[in-house]
Image: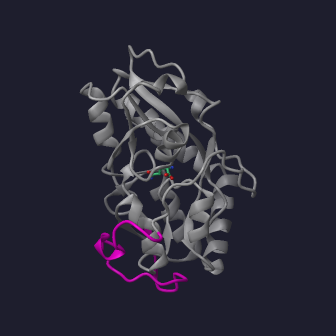
């Protein structure tokens, strides 16, 4: 399984994505006013207050989840540790506003949050709505199937019951392959569906899949590099917020150079 741990030893240039983008939320989905308000402070475009408010969706282990000791309040994970370090580096307190994944970019555009850190893949469509930092992690889509599944490559999903998570790049990838699928709101719900034998395969990001399979030994991961390209995770800021973007980039570059992000990934993926 180590094999799919592709570290973000990436340059400053984003790789061209091999597939299309998913909904950016800029002109659809729910209103940002329904998104959580746990940060307890209004965001400012340039994070000029004493806080930098990060939006996330804490349903994406090992990047963000509720539980553990919590790096920022009750929120734990690789992204949360990165967010906290960015706060430290720019002299602000990092706080978290937890909301639905689909609401994140809209909340950013509305100024409700300063930045999005959510294992978010850079896509051309999202780039039209927001600006992305340098990438900090490389992932890919994988298939999670029961141990005894005959699915060995993406094409084997053609006549199978496929589940994806709504708004994730996994949904776009399966859609682009032309297969029918059902979209669930949460990864945990999708995994439950698979464990209950109600679907045959869940398509989701690699590190999150590793976490779910580790917790559910009756499941396994199937990779298909020819069908699923690399994805780069990056932090999003409001379009034109170059001051904050530059600060975030400096902080991420430092964490990449010092091996902090690799260490965090190892820690959270290996953690029991
Ligand atoms: N990387 C996937 C995406 O950007 C999933 C991210 C997430 O669920 N937090 O769509």
Residue 139, above or below 108: above
Front one among 64 and 256? 64
Going 29% across and 72% down the picture, which residue do you hit?
34
Residue 174 x, y percent position in the rendering: 49, 39
Q: How many marks?
A: 0
Going 60% across and 56% down the picture, which residue do you hit?
123
Residue 154 as seen in the image, left or right of residue 150: right
Name the quadrant of the C terminus.
top left
Residue 192 as seen in the image, left or right of residue 233: left
Residue 197 x, y percent position in the rendering: 27, 24
Q: From this viewpoint, is residue 270 visible?
A: no
Residue 189 occupies quadrant: top left
Residue 8 x, y percent position in the rendering: 65, 46
Going 54% across and 37% down the picture, which residue do you hit?
177
Front one among 223 and 128? 128
Q: From this viewpoint, is residue 154 visible?
A: yes
- Residue span colored magenta: 26-54
Residue sitting at the far left: 196
Residue 218 as seen in the image, left or right of residue 150: left
Front one among 71 and 121? 121
Q: Does the magenta stretch include residue 244?
A: no
Going 58% across and 28% down the picture, which residue do you hit?
224
Residue 103 occupies quadrant: bottom left
Front one among 249 and 165? 165
Task: Tell me the chief SS of the magenta region.
Answer: loop
Residue 235 x, y percent position in the rendering: 56, 63
Residue 190 occupies quadrant: top left
Q: Is residue 30 magenta?
A: yes
């Amino acid at each position: 399984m180590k094999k799919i741990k592709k570290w973000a030893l990436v340059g400053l240039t984003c790789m061209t994505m091999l597939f299309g983008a998913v909904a950016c939320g800029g002109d659809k989905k729910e209103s940002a006013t329904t998104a959580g308000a746990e940060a307890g402070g209004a965001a400012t475009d340039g994070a000029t207050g004493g806080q930098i408010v990060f939006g996330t969706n804490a349903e994406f282990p090992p990047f963000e989840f509720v539980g553990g000791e919590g790096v920022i309040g009750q929120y734990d994970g690789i992204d949360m540790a990165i967010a906290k370090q960015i706060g430290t580096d720019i002299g602000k307190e990092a706080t978290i506003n937890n909301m639905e994944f689909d609401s994140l970019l809209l909340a950013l555009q509305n100024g409700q949050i300063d930045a999005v850190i959510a294992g978010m893949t850079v896509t051309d469509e999202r780039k039209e709505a927001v600006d992305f930092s340098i990438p900090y992690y490389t992932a890919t889509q994988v298939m999670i199937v029961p141990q005894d599944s005959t699915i060995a490559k993406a094409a084997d999903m053609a006549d199978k019951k496929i589940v994806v998570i709504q708004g994730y790049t996994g949904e776009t990838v399966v859609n682009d392959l032309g297969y029918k699928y059902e979209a669930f709101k949460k990864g945990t719900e999708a995994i439950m569906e698979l464990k209950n034998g109600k679907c045959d395969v869940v398509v989701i990001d690699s590190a999150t899949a590793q976490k779910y399979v580790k917790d559910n030994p009756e499941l396994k991961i199937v990779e298909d590099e020819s069908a699923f390209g690399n994805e780069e995770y990056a932090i999003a800021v409001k379009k034109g917020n170059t001051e904050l973007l530059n600060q975030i980039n400096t902080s991420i570059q430092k964490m990449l150079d010092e091996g902090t992000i690799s260490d965090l990934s190892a820690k959270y993926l290996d953690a029991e």
